Amino acid sequence: MTGKSLIRVIEATKTFGALRAVDGVSIDVRQGEFLALLGPSGCGKTTLLRAIAGFENLQSGRIEIDGQDVTGEPPYRRPVNMVFQSYALFPHLNVAGNVAFGLRQDGLERAEIDRRVADVLALVRLDGLARQRPDRLSGGQRQRVALARALVKRPKALLLDEPMAALDRKLRQATRSELVRLQRDSGTTFIMVTHDQEEALATASRVAVMREGRLVQIGTPEDIYDRPISRWAAEFVGEINVFDAVMAEGGDMIAPSLGCRVGRAKTIERGSVFGLRPERVGLLPADGEGGVEGIVVETSFLGDRVLLRVRTKAGGVLKVSLSADAARAGEARFGAAVRLAWSEDAVMALAE
Amino acid sequence: MRVRSIAWPVAVLMLGCWAVLFLVGPLAIVFKISFSEAVLARPPYTPLIARSEAGLALQASGANYATVLTDSLYLRAFGKSLWIAFLATLIALVIALPMAYAIARSGPRRRSTLLALVLLPFWTSFLIRVYAWIAVLKDEGLLNAALLALGVIGAPLAILNTDAAVIIGIVHAYLPFMLLPIYVAFERQPPDMAEAAADLGAGPIGTFWSVTLPLAAPGIFAGSVLVLVPAIGEAIIPDLLGGADTLMIGKVMWTEFFQNRDWPVASAIAIVLLAILVGPVVWFERRETRRLLERGS
């Protein structure tokens, strides 16, 4: 993950009227990485992607691709290709025609075009469908045509705008691993826009979290999940319990809502709040000693996991995520009294 | 089961009444007359079923069709009509295409203004618009006066009473019918089609030719049919702007009917014209319906 920088976005700003869609964002995209641009809708991630593709002109800032300043260049002169959210397949061309479109623009020879189209269709496993019209294909097949059409150009980077938004849940799971495989096999740099944090964490080698046009945090999925830079980032990516704490004698930090110690004062550097991921909380034997006592006030069964809401004796509510087995063994049913415990390093201090 | 409102039977009834009263009925009458013979009487044709002492006898004759399909006058008129209508359609297409594209690509407010301007001529009677062309095209008309004043020509051009004048008249009168379907076809195209083309390396011209224009093909086809079909049967424009040799079938039919009082031949011409036009139109309709069904599935 120390590849050289391929795309440099430098202080990019794009406004639509009064809205600052992208507000002074700088990102270095490294050669060969799979970068996810993650954020809620309206955070500017798609605008940033479209600016890299050349569909949006920046008010200020620059974009460099492979050392070349492409800031004012139109899309057809940029060595990147895009997979549109709608896939934007040409309905008047069949699958092979769609895939060959970009190569024809480059004026390649027919034999070369045919060979590369066949290769890329094999890569995305659409070999048998070259003569089909796009409107005869399933959603998953259409997406793979869109991928093939962009990849066949051998772009320096492949830009994906919510590539899985139009697929149903089951297909999305399969497509994720397909994307990761494609990215690895082709060695192409991928930049994917998504609002789905699970998707971003599962596929990307690095995740850039955006909010209101600004870059909040960029790092590996583990960085983003385990070391969120702020309370907002922690709450946006995954589930988290957030609580206040006060300093007690001896430098211990006590959370009033939980009625327990959550850490040492010296570990607090930035924040006044603390976070605890639900899956880091475990059960102690209910008839034993220690831990935080509480009553289960809500359960939801997800098959492999069980989500609990536990009201502590001190009055706070903790979200707890247990494996189904652990929940069964601990008899953590609705209304049951439980003892909760977690390791101290699971508690993170969060900047407000 | 599909739920239908009360409006459904009402709509079907209205459509049926309209079709019978103004399409099927009159057509049946014309069809019937086309098998009669012209006589100096009132009505000016022989009855199809004759009553005689031997009883009722069918006296239908194909003679009118034989005349229409063999007499060089009618054949030339059919040929000329097709040729003039074809040229006019082509010219209308060349003019309407960039206009439609420009309107579809302009902002929403300017777009509605431009569309209103396209439709504005309909506020004036068709006949008056055709008459206006006489004033423009005649030897001492506006066009010649302007060209003479500019020194482009030395003597007035004889445009009025030629095929050219008829083509100009048809193009002007039918341009909106060409423009509107093409405009709709451009306007409905998702913007990401052109974006995808640009992303894949196509410049503005390449994008237009390889994506935007092919996707507008149904609109271009519809507009062309909407101009071609009425232009072939056009009677008023050749009558007012055409010359003695601008023999279009619509005008011939008019002459047969009103001047020669030969209703049966006029009817036969109408039926033949219908047969020529119905084929392509039905084919087009079928194709469009099939395409829509395929899209929906």
Image (cartoon, rainbow, N blue to C red):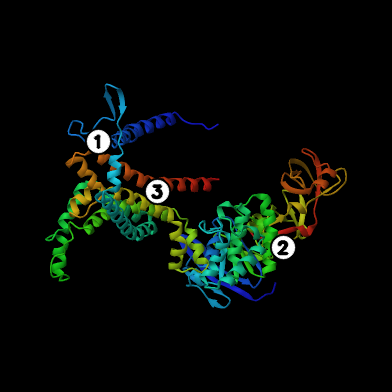
The x and y percentages for residue A182 are: 67, 64
In the image shown, does B138 or B181 lie closer to the viewer? B138
The chain that hosts pointer 1 is: B
The x and y percentages for residue A318 are: 73, 47
Where is mark 2, residue-wise?
A222
**Image point (74%, 61%), residue name:** A265
Q: Amino acid at mark 1?
A: Glu
In the image shown, does B56 or B135 lie closer to the viewer? B56
Residue at mark 1 to residue at mark 3: CA–CA distance: 30 Å
In the image shown, does A272 or B41 lie closer to the viewer? B41
Q: Earlier in the sequence, mark 1 or mark 3?
A: 1
Write down the quadrant of residue B267 in the picture.
top left
Q: Quadrant of the N terminus of chain A?
A: bottom right
- Circles 2 and 1 on the same subunit: no
Where is mark 3, residue-wise?
B280
- Horizontally, residue A336 falls left or right of residue A20, namely right
Q: Amino acid at mark 3?
A: Pro
Which residue in the rendered view is the most extreme toward the right? A288
Q: Amino acid at mark 2?
A: Glu
In the image shown, does B77 or B177 lie closer to the viewer? B77
Q: Secondary structure at mark 1?
A: loop
The x and y percentages for residue A201 are: 68, 59
- Circles 3 and 2 on the same subunit: no
> Mark 2 and mark 3 in contact (Cβ < 8 Å)?
no
> Mark 1 and mark 2 in contact (Cβ < 8 Å)?
no
Which of the numbered marks, if any, corresponds to residue B37?
1
Residue A195 visible at all: no
Q: Quadrant of the C terminus of chain A?
A: bottom right
Q: Nearer the viewer, mark 2 or mark 1?
A: 1
Q: Nearer the viewer, mark 1 or mark 3?
A: 1
- Circles 1 and 3 on the same subunit: yes
Residue at mark 2 to residue at mark 1: CA–CA distance: 95 Å
